[in-house]
Image: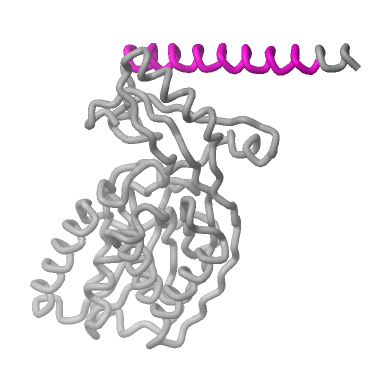
Amino acid sequence: MRESGKTIGICTSIVAPYRLKADISNIETAAKFICRLDESAKKPENLQKYRATIPEFSIKNNEEFMDLESSKIITLRVNGKHNHSGATPMDRRQDAVVGTAKFIENLSDNPDIQFLETCTPIWGANQITDCCEMKFAVNNFEQNVTQLHNAQKDAEHFANVHFERIEGIEQPDKESGIYVDIRQQLGMNPKLTSGMVFETVKDAVSQVKTKFDINIKAMGKPYQTHSDLITVATKICETKQIPYEIIPSRAGHDIGTLTKNPNARTTLLFCASSGGSHNVDETTTVEAIEKLVDVESTLAQEELERANTLYCQKESSLEER
């Protein structure tokens, strides 16, 4: 909104989260699943339907390892930028998990390289992760250094992240696996999202034998705001000559609990900001906040007058009876 010169966003619909925890016994398979899910969400036909995020990617490979004594053990940290999974467009992310998964996928067919573990030290259920770590073993390091370098550069470009060498991984004392957060917009629902996820899973495990258990955590449905209030808010912005945009919300909001009431008239207004969402760079100007308050207070006053008119009409009707 800020880039387009709009001050107020008038929300038409609000996403609902579809979340799951997956227990995957193979790092390479998990990486392929993450990459396929990310690629699917970035397709032009899906950009308006949903946004997919993997906040957690913490797995220890359960397979028998090659002879590690003759291998070079490398531990890398992938650095991205913390941001909100719903509010941040797919093409503007600096996603450490996606960068890690892409690096692993690029090297998954190399028999000299075996991934031992991955870890997201700090993560939140609705967050793009800013740090993901991995440890892997390399045989014949000199012969593979070029491929390692190319895999890293491709992953950095793909996910807009950067890599650094670290001494080791300190795995948190918790269950391993991957956590998936999908923000469904109108046109999607839990049934369609489940089908999309399981098709992606099937593609990831089609050529390997691996354990893949899924535990669904949330299956919400997207919802609409009230069309009358959208119209009223639009007229208020036009009267006050405040630049506005009619947009869907890509993040969930508590207002959804009110929207489930068929008698409720709900709306959601945004003001322009920059720097992303849920991070230290998020910035909103005082001017934008003042204009938002102006529109909201006018809208609230008009709603009170509408409610008072309806109340008076009802009282008059009762008196006539």
In this picture, residue 123 sits left or right of residue 90? right
Residue at the extreme front of the image, as rendered: 320
Between 255 and 173, the one lying in front of the other is: 255
Between 267 and 113, the one lying in front of the other is: 267
Number of numbered discs overlaid on the protein picture: 0
Question: Taken as a whole, is the magenta stretch helix, strand or loop?
Answer: helix
Residue drawn at x 51%, y 80% is 211
On whether residue 292 falls in the magenta region, the answer is yes
The residue stretch that appears in magenta: 286-314
> On screen, 228 above or below 63?
above
Instruction: Examine the rendering and report whether any part of residue 273 can be seen.
Output: yes
Residue drawn at x 38%, y 48% is 128
> On screen, 102 above or below 82?
below
Residue 238: quadrant of the picture:
top left
> On screen, 309 above or below 144?
above
In this picture, residue 237 sits left or right of residue 232? left
Q: Position of residue 229 (x, y in %)?
A: 53, 28
Instruction: Examine the rendering and report whether any part of residue 181 can be seen.
Output: no
On whether residue 105 falls in the magenta region, the answer is no
Residue 133: quadrant of the picture:
bottom left
In this picture, residue 61 sits left or right of residue 160? right
Instruction: Name the image quarter holding the C terminus.
Output: top right
Between 161 and 59, the one lying in front of the other is: 161
Residue drawn at x 41%, y 27% is 270
Residue 200: quadrant of the picture:
bottom left
